[in-house]
Amino acid sequence: MTTLSESPVDADTPVSKTWFVYLVRAANGSLYCGISDDPVRRFAKHQSGKGARFFLSSPAMALVYTERCRDKSDALRQERLIKKLRKSAKECLVASVAHASSI
């Protein structure tokens, strides 16, 4: 007999976390790409100077792009693709989010 407090999902089934690939704009205008299961928390860590050495020379100013991924490996794949893009293409990603939020 199943009670209301029991989960209908098998306890051995792993719960998949949502992962994101994100871009942060530094004070010097450059864009940093990374992955996280909580991009807002990770951005706060970057701002505090504890997130990545990238921000030692120019502090993190804004979280400008996030993209939801299926899982961590998908996020890593997407991060590699974004890191290969020219800055102008990364700026297009940022602009697409800014445009979508203004509609």
Image: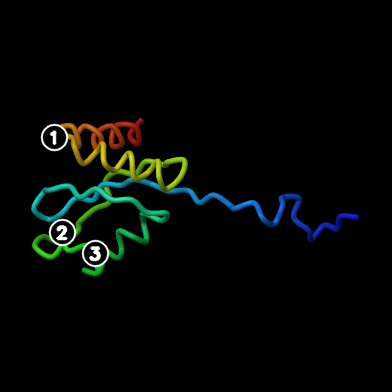
The Cα–Cα distance between marks 2 and 3, rounded to whole angstroms, is: 11 Å
- Tell me: 89 left or right of 17: left
Q: Foreground: 48 or 79?
A: 79
The dot on residue 86 is 1
Q: Foreground: 85 or 93?
A: 85
Circle 3/circle 1 CB separation < 8 Å: no
Within 10 Å of disc 2 (Cα), the crowding (few <14, some 14-19, many 20+) is some
Residue type (three-letter) at the residue carrying disc 3:
Gln
Residue at the location (33% across, 60% down)? 42
Q: Pointer 2: what residue?
A: 54
Q: Foreground: 8 or 27?
A: 8
Dividing the picture into quadrants, the one containing residue 90 is top left
The mark that comes first in sequence, 2 or 3, is 3
Q: Secondary structure at mark 2?
A: helix
Badge nearest the viewer, 3 or 1: 1
Q: Pointer 3: what residue?
A: 47
The Cα–Cα distance between marks 2 and 1, rounded to whole angstroms, is: 18 Å
Provide residue 58's location: percent of width, then percent of height. Answer: 11, 60
Residue type (three-letter) at the residue carrying disc 2:
Phe
The mark that comes first in sequence, 3 or 1, is 3
Circle 2/circle 1 CB separation < 8 Å: no
The mark that comes first in sequence, 2 or 1, is 2
Q: Secondary structure at mark 3?
A: helix
Provide residue 21's location: percent of width, then percent of height. Answer: 34, 45
Which image quadrant: the N terminus? bottom right
Residue type (three-letter) at the residue carrying disc 1:
Arg
Q: Secondary structure at mark 1?
A: loop
Provide residue 41's location: percent of width, then percent of height. Answer: 37, 61
